[in-house]
Image (tube, coloured by chain):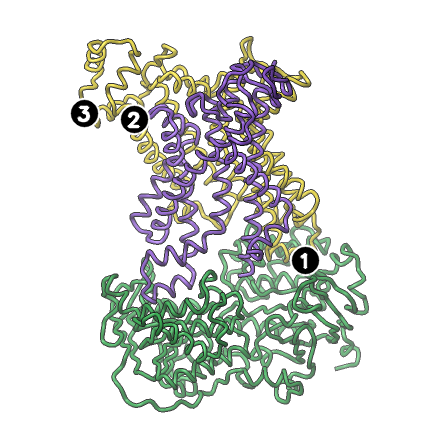
Amino acid sequence: MRKFFLPYLSSPITVVGGLLSLGWLLIALLAPVLAPYDPIKTLMPLAKPGALNPAGGTFWLGTDMLGRDILSRLIYGARTVVVFATLATLTAYLVGVVLGLIAGYRGGRLDAVLSYFANVVLSFPVLVLYIVIIVVIGSSPFNIILAVTFGSAPAIFRIVRGITIDVASRDYVAAAITQGESAWRIMLFDILPNASGPLAVDFCLRLGYTAITIGTLGFLGLGLPPPTPDWGTMVNEGRGMAIAFPHLVIFPCLAISSLMLGLSLLADGLREVSDAQGRRA
Amino acid sequence: MTTQERQPILKVENLSVTLPKGSDRPFAVNNVSFNLSPGEILCVVGESGSGKSVLSSALMGAVPEGLKVAGGHVLLEGKDLTRLSEKAFRAIRGRDIAMIFQEPMASLNPAMTVAAQIEEVFLLHSDFDARERAKRARDLVVAMRLPNPDRILKSFPHQLSGGQCQRVVIAMALAMSPRVLIADEPTTALDVTTQAQVLKLIGELRDVHGHGIVFITHDFGVVADIADRVAVMKHGEIVEIGEAKQVLTAPQHPYTQALIAAVPSLDPHDRPTAPEAEPVLAVRGLHHSYGALAVLKDIDLSLAPGRVVSIVGESGCGKSTLAKAMIRLIDARGGRVEVAGTDLRVLPAKKLEKYRRTIQMIFQDPFGSLNPRRRVGPMIARAARLAGASSAEARRRTEELLDLVGLHKSAYWRKPSAFSGGQRQRIGIARALAMQPDVLIADESVSALDVSVQAQVLALLRDLQERLQLAIVFITHDLRVAAQISDEIVVMQKGEIVERGTAAKVLQQPSHPYTRTLLEAAPGRSTF
Amino acid sequence: MTLILFIVRKLGGAAAAMLTVSFLVYMALEVNVEDVAVKVLGQFSTDAQRAAWLTANGYDDPFLIRYGRWLWSFVSGNWGESTYYRAPVIDLVPDRLAASGLLAGGALLVMVPVGLFAGLLAGMRPGSLIDRAVSLLSIVTTSIPDFASAVFLSAVFVFWLNWLPGASTMLSGFSFSEMVLPVLVLAFYSTGYLARVTRASMVEVMGTHYVRTARLKGASPARIVWRHALRNALITPVTVIMLQLPWLLSGVIVVEVFYAYKGFGTLLYDAALNSDIRLVEACAMVSVLVVVATQILSDIAYGWLNPRVSLLEAAMGSK
């Protein structure tokens, strides 16, 4: 175990990234314990950060125009982001990895058809795609996961397909073929483990970008329906009064930026270690 | 020769280069001294990791990142290069001392024409005007005997062959007629006939133009053909240096003796006579093409149990395609590949998986042929399982095989990264044997190994072959290796078999002109 | 000749992609006829009104025939009426597209020089202080979502320093100061991304054999960078710049909504919010057209920079 983690701990940037990501994960898990107030309860409208609650306690980050405590909404918002971003990224990965492996390893007509559709989907600017999908099927938690899966799976498919084609040209795959190993075992035991380095890097980044996408949809008012605490929606609700009350929008923006920064730094560290291992092998 | 000429132009005194902290030894180059005279080729020979390439970059004042020249002097006509500033060295590089590299194609800028790259040397080191530069660049290309010089000058590197690229690199190095040339494995990446031509060219540079040449190589055959003097390097030190004839025929240092003893001879090795038997491999009329390009034309081949046939040829002759078609890593267009009586070429995919056992392969690249994520024991055991063994049996067979190929029991739970190239090749052999195949294909299986390791792996293969009465198809570009292991040799050129016969006949009384060319081009023929 | 063949082949591919996209878009938005009627006539129309409208507009025909008719009128320039703006769609799009083009052009003007320069500088000496600074900065800028950088930059320049206006409605004609923030926000992410890509490419090129050859010829560091490394190191970033354009188009939506800028992004956004399906269809098709066009341009740039790739080969799809 120690040996596994050691290379990652040697880079301070990776450690910072890991701590930031882990921090948000903990906040999401412990939201009910950490949040000082109920995130959807009206307490006192438009309190400035640090204002005292007449009923006792402090609004450390102030309240929004409906009088809800922003800190509590941020903490519960972490939950929303972690749950939905993870679910959406995982389903996208499931689809992308399975199809990418098959297309990359089998090649031929199946590959041509899948690649063509991936390219068509990828030729939509991401946000245009999401907007069209949300307009058609409406915005609900399930539909957002569906939209993100549809939007990111082709990109994952392309990456996995590329790596698969590369790994499949190695002699150890040829060796497995000449031993009469079945195709699915080769994909699962010979190709996938050797693709795990770049895929782990991509997963971190994509998790972050999914969080940003959900945030952006929230910002555009196309996200999760109210009153779910969601960072993007908080910015959307607050931006009309942002000039007078910047705390309405600054804190949720800091939250999502720091989460993404954590994941980017983590991805960077993972990439360095996986490159170094690649060079040694 | 006059005494004036015998004055060394390059004197290296106690040169040391340190490796970064945490390396397996403190010095890449340790206390190396030698002299080089004009009109002399000094060959620096050594195996991988001997420090010979670092030495060459140190002479050019350009050691790789992380390494440092820690002591000693490099005197070029009396001037100490180790004390020059980077800027002063720049004026000397390419003008007084120039270098030729191992990867000719990669050494040329892909986005510049040949003319621009050669003319650049004049631009850097002379005040010739554009016309003069162009004229001289053309003269150099002509002097390198490149065909159609005007086309070559306008070409980009990717439009040329490897041999042509190497001539362009040499032209670049010679542009300012430097006193000293450093050649770092300049022919290693080339085919044997191209190698012979480039070696001839380098020999002329010495004889006609009197350049002093430091020639770095791992190949004793090349040394025998070209060297005036030889320095043998091991672990960063020169263990022996002397006149070529002296070092090659009466080596003093035990390491040199071992290296020279490991050079495979061109004389066919004695082979036990195998009993007459039905062929276990029968290839009939096998042919294949990529688009309109026929890469295999009507190949016939048969092999009896306990016999070894070598398929010899240069890169692009189709020998690797033949190997892949026989083992059905590619689907050939037509013909038959019968292994133990079953035509593998036409078997449907599902059925083929069951018959795969009968024909197995040992691959070329020891670093690419083992899955880095799997442990050695389970990897071999899996092969045994696929061949039908129970898991206990597979485990037992794996342990036996590890012992058979000369690896310790502890190898079982290690990953491939823990092993050297030679050891990995042994693991690859064990994995192939775990399936108890009827036919074994060895595709350039010893080409990537150092000469001493190569000799050991070859000896192992020969031993296993005799003990287990294996039928082996041995694919190689190296006639010397073929001579060491084959009963029969098949010579391929442009997808066709041009000559076949017993090893002795092909090597000693070749009938086809191409076989003769190959034999003549084999480096060091007069010595080894 | 090769160039023509290349372009013809690429255009063929683009047309095929557009056709697939148009089918998907049309199917997504108009396969459910009832929905279409509700969206066009509004929530409060009666069943009889909807049925009459559907019949009048040929919605009783099979789907494929409707699609063919729609496609034909789309190609011939009849993009339908916008229900929200109450104007022909074709009259709305060009002005808005030009306005967004202005934003994207401004962003490119910032992103290309800054991103390339920072990336090349960092990649010349991997591990140096400059390299580490550029790498960290580019990670930070690529980690901040567009709407967040809009909030941050506005907080600084509008709220705190009071230098720039917080909205870019351009109600009283074109205003340069109203352009600054949207352009900066748009360039923020892409500049960091471009710097990263350029750095990686430069590091790789500086480690190649041919750069070593140049050094051993006696070329100076400046000459090595300018003459040998630059052109080869630019191949990837130039492709990336081209492929950033669609990305900018996504950013454009967020930025325009944030600053209430009347461009293509807000047009699509308003169309989406108001279920203006004719407008959504047109906007989706136009954005895909932009993407496909930039892909062709990036392929041409790639072939032009890289003599190893002949355009003919690229045209045959063996890239």
Instruction: From the viewer's side, name the closer residue of A195 and C206.
Output: A195
Residue C245 visible, this orientation? no
**Mark 3 neighbour class, 10 Å CA radius: few under 14, some 14 to 19, many 20 or more:** few
Q: Which mark is residue B65?
A: 1
Q: Quadrant of residue B334?
A: bottom left
Instruction: State whether discs 1 and 2 lie on one chain.
Output: no
Instruction: From the viewer's side, name the closer residue of B522 and B512.
Output: B522
Q: Quadrant of residue B496?
A: bottom left
Which residue is labeled 2 in the image? C26
Mark 1 is on which residue type?
A: Glu
Q: Name the subunit of mark 3.
A: C
Instruction: From the viewer's side, name the closer residue of B397 and B138.
Output: B397
Image coordinates for residue B60, horizontal then vertical, percent? 70, 63
Q: Secondary structure at mark 1?
A: loop
Q: Secondary structure at mark 3?
A: loop
**Mark 2 neighbour class, 10 Å CA radius: few under 14, some 14 to 19, many 20 or more:** some
Q: Name the subunit of mark 1.
A: B
Image coordinates for residue B461, horizontal then vertical, percent? 43, 80
State the separation of the CA atoms marked 1 and 2: 58 Å
Residue name at image x 39 percent, y 72 percent? B395
Which residue is labeled 3 in the image? C62
Q: Which chain, by letter, is purple? A: A
Q: Which chain, by letter, is yellow? A: C
